Image (spheres, grey):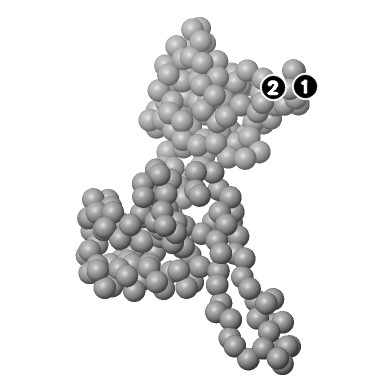
């Protein structure tokens, strides 16, 4: 079993609030976490009269940005202590356009890694490969699909021609992929299925029709680049 991993060690959290609404000035967009972090580091690195704070600010690293304006910063323990002292003395400067509501230590979050199995479903791999090839407009034939698997999925055993053919047929029956004269394609939400189910129901209701009508499926894909 994998050992637990400690996330965000030696971090401080700064709870921020904007001084004005995001759209108050010309419809400005909400700044991202890294932009807020750079503004915070810049504001305190310019405290030239407090060399300890300026030096500690320059050593800060961006740790993360949580919704509702929580900035996570990381630094060596000594630098974090300087920031704590500056906050206690009301000397810690906020990033421009924000107010610091609270500052506190973040306890490390423990992550228990989930162990992966050695088995990879062939159908899943084929769908991923066909999707990638469709996205790059590579014609997907059985031959080109095998070449793609050998090149981009070196960790799996390359299936035989019979197994590949059978698995592709199963995926078609499950309506995960479809085949045209131009190769195999992934079924997407933009792919529509037009069946003759209604015709079959009408056939059952008509007693004078004794011959069976073969069921057919027509694929109409409206996704750009796929015809």
Residue picked out by circle 1: 24
Spot occupied by residue 43 in the image (x, y as percentages of width and height): 55, 15
For residue 112, say whether it is visible. no
104 or 99, which is in the foreground? 99
| Residue 198, placed above or below residue 19 | below
Give the residue displayed 60% in from the left and 36% down from the top: 70
The local secondary structure at tag 2 comes to: loop
- Gap between marks 2 and 1 measured at Cα: 7 Å
Q: Quadrant of residue 206?
A: bottom right
199 or 225, which is in the foreground? 199
**Residue found farthest to the top:** 49
Describe residue 76's horizontal placement relative to residue 13 as left or right. Answer: left
Spot occupied by residue 66 in the image (x, y as percentages of width and height): 58, 40
- Residue 41, numbered circle: none
* Callout 2–callout 1 Cβ contact below 8 Å: yes
Describe residue 27's horizontal placement relative to residue 45 as left or right. Answer: right
22 or 99, which is in the foreground? 22
Q: Quadrant of residue 189?
A: bottom right
Describe residue 64's horizontal placement relative to residue 149 as left or right. Answer: right
| Residue 55, placed above or below residue 112 | above
Spot occupied by residue 205 in the image (x, y as percentages of width and height): 73, 88
Give the residue displayed 26% in from the left and 73% down from the top: 162
**Residue found farthest to the front:** 208
153 or 39, which is in the foreground? 153
* Circle 2 residues within 10 Å: few <14, some 14–19, many ≥20: few
For residue 17, say whether it is visible. yes
Spot occupied by residue 190 in the image (x, y as percentages of width and height): 59, 54
Give the residue displayed 30% in from the left and 60% down from the top: 142
- Residue 28, numbered circle: 2
Describe residue 101's horizontal placement relative to residue 120 as left or right. Answer: right
């Amino acid at each position: 079993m994998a050992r637990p991993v400690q996330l965000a060690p030696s971090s401080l959290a700064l709870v921020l609030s904007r001084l004005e609404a995001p759209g108050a000035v010309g419809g400005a967009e909400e700044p991202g976490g890294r932009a807020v972090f750079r503004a915070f580091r810049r504001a305190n690195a310019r405290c030239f009269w407090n060399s300890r704070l300026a030096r500690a600010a320059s050593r800060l690293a961006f740790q993360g940005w949580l919704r509702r304006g929580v900035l996570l910063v990381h630094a060596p323990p000594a630098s974090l202590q300087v920031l704590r002292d500056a906050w206690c003395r009301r000397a810690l400067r906020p990033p421009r356009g924000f107010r610091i509501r609270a500052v506190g230590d973040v306890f490390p979050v423990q992550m228990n890694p989930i162990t992966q199995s050695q088995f990879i479903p062939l159908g899943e791999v084929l769908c991923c490969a066909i999707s990638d090839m469709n996205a790059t407009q590579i014609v997907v034939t059985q031959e080109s699909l095998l070449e793609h698997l050998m090149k981009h999925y070196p960790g799996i055993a390359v299936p035989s021609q019979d197994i590949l053919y059978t698995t592709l047929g199963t995926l078609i029956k499950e309506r995960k992929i479809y085949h045209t004269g131009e190769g195999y394609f992934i079924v997407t939400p933009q792919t529509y299925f037009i069946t003759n189910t209604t015709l079959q129901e009408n056939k059952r209701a008509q007693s004078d029709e004794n011959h069976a009508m073969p069921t057919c499926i027509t694929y109409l894909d409206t996704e750009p680049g796929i015809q």
